[in-house]
Image: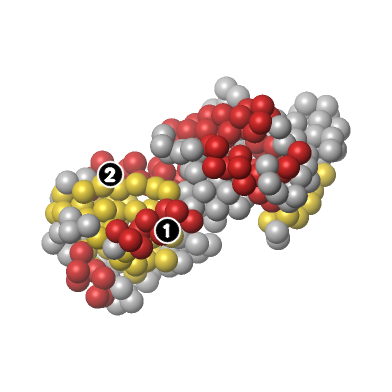
């Protein structure tokens, strides 16, 4: 599952190649033929991300909404147009590059009312400058759920994925089971600021880096984490505890993050 920074990174990349361009849109796999036919030959006016949702705004006030889900994949490639690889649901072709989207959980056209309904369901996105942290705090401070669970609930706060959750809570010395209602406003503000800082770094470096001043790793796994996937806490050198929260693995240090 891509984390929020990868979707914002894609929005930024696609804005560069598609904004104010007329796009050729097709559905090589055939499952989005009608939608593609409607978008084909129209001008793309903006590309943006709300949490893990990608929105391509087209002239005529319609938007293409894409959510990759667990298995979706985006590929950007330079022209000339290569043969589609695998089951390409939608292919967007500009004048220098194309984007292929395979296996998305959602790929649909939304009118302005439907788009407003979607963005209203998504919590404030830490990577959007127009995000309102008060909305997230209002939800968190009313909840008995653990903060570890709340951080991954995209209707409370959008953009934080599994690795960032573990890392932010460790950096903020917060136990994942701390009930939302017991999180102080000061602690929330620090957590929000840290999330913005880390996810912006993720967009810029195109890798999850939660260790201050570390370069991305080489090879397939470019992440640089403190305790995610680790056995030992780098702060206290004690053992890291592994847990599952809503079926996703999480880590915490019982010494540095007491409840
Ligand atoms: Zn520790």
Label 1, ligand 1: CB separation under 8 Å: no
- What quarter of the picture does the N terminus occupy? bottom right
Q: Are marks 1 and 2 in contact (CB under 8 Å)?
A: no
As displayed, is residue 186 above or below residue 55?
above
The secondary element bearing badge 2 is classed as: helix
- Mark 1 or 2 closer to N-term? 2
The structure residue drawn at horizontal position 58% and vertical position 33%, both measured from the top left corner, is 192
Q: Position of residue 56 (x, y in %)?
A: 29, 54
Q: Is residue 88 left or right of residue 82?
A: right
Considering depth in this image, is 131 or 181 the residue closer to the camera?
A: 181
Foreground pick, 220 / 176: 176
Q: Nearer the viewer, mark 1 or mark 2?
A: 1
Q: CA distance from mark 1 to mark 2?
A: 21 Å
Q: What is the crowding at mark 2: few (fewer than 14 residues within 10 Å), some, or many (at least 20)?
A: some
Q: For residue 228, what is the image quadrant?
A: top right
Q: Quadrant of the C terminus?
A: top right
Q: Is residue 204 visible?
A: yes
Q: In this rendering, would 63 be left or right of 195?
A: left
Q: Position of residue 149 (x, y in %)?
A: 69, 51
The residue carrying mark 1 is 118
Q: Secondary structure at mark 1?
A: helix
Q: Residue at x 48, y 33 (%)?
A: 200
Mark 2 = which residue?
Answer: 15
Does ligand 1 reach within 8 Å of label 2's beta carbon? Answer: no
Q: Position of residue 40 (x, y in %)?
A: 17, 64
90 vs 145, left or right, is left
108 on left or right of 251: left
Numbered circle sitting on residue 216: none
Above or below, 37 relative to 156? below
């Amino acid at each position: 599952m891509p984390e929020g920074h990868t979707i914002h990174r894609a929005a930024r990349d696609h804005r560069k190649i598609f904004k104010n361009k007329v796009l050729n849109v097709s559905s090589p796999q055939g499952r989005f033929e009608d939608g593609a036919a409607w978008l084909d030959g129209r001008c793309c006016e903006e590309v943006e991300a709300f949490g893990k949702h990608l929105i391509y705004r087209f002239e005529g006030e319609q938007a293409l909404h894409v959510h990759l889900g667990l298995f979706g994949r985006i590929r950007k490639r330079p022209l000339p147009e290569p043969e589609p690889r695998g089951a390409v649901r939608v292919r967007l072709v500009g004048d220098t590059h194309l984007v292929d989207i395979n296996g998305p959980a959602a790929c649909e056209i939304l009118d302005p009312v439907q788009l407003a309904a979607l963005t209203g369901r998504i919590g404030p996105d830490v990577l959007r400058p127009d995000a309102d942290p008060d909305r997230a705090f209002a939800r968190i401070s009313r909840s008995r759920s653990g903060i570890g669970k709340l951080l991954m609930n995209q209707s409370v706060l959008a953009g934080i994925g599994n690795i960032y959750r573990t890392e932010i809570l460790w950096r903020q010395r917060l136990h994942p089971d701390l009930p939302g209602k017991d999180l102080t406003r000061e602690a929330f503000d620090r957590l929000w600021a840290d999330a913005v800082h880390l996810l912006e770094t993720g967009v810029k470096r195109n890798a999850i880096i939660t260790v201050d001043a570390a370069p991305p790793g080489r090879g397939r796994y470019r992440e640089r984490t403190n305790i995610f996937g680790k056995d030992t806490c780098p702060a206290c050198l004690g053992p890291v505890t592994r847990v599952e929260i809503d079926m996703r693995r999480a880590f915490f240090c019982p010494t540095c993050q007491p409840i």
